[in-house]
Image: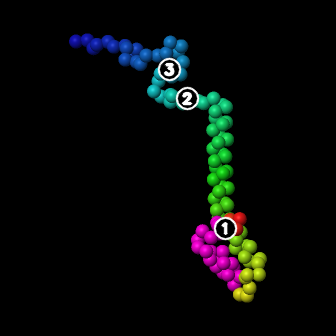
Amino acid sequence: MPAPSHSITENAPPCNDDASNELEATSPMIPPTPPSMPPELEESILVAYRSVGIGTFGVVMRFIGMPLEKIALFMNSSQVTGANPIRQSVKLTFAGGAMAPYRVVGPAS
């Protein structure tokens, strides 16, 4: 019994017509291109993002800095005398509670 004759080209995968090695556009090997935004919209979003970041930074720094400013004011005043002026300044700064440094507008204003 003779062996069946199969040609090698019958089992080979199909080739591109242009005989190049490039993948076709519908190939699952190429990731899809994400949709892009217009440049004006991208710039506007970037400006808003940076503004929010800088604003948040400013608020946090002000929140941290207010008690330090009050401590510095007390250290330079005549209310602090003798030993351990930093402890006395901190004690005077927070004498009205934890939020005392943030109450800067008094009832007389």
Quadrant in which residue 69 is drawn: bottom right
Query: Which comes sooner in the sequence, label 1 or label 3?
Result: 3
Identify the element where label 1 is drawn: loop
Residue type marked 1: Pro
Towards the viewer: 74 or 51: 74
Identify the element where label 2 is drawn: loop
Residue in the picture at 64% in, 79% down: 91
Labelled pair 1, 3 in contact (Cβ < 8 Å):
no
Q: Alpha-carbon neighbours of circle 2 within 10 Å: few (<14), some, or many (≥20)?
A: few
Q: Which mark is residue 107?
A: 1
The residue at which mark 2 appears reads as: 35
**The N terminus: image quadrant:** top left
Outermost residue to the bottom:
82
Measured as percent of width and height from the top left, residue 97 is found at 59, 73
Labelled pair 3, 2 in contact (Cβ < 8 Å):
no
Is residue 61 highlighted in magenta? Answer: no
Q: Which mark is residue 24?
A: 3
State the CA–CA distance, disc 1 to disc 2: 57 Å
Outermost residue to the front:
108
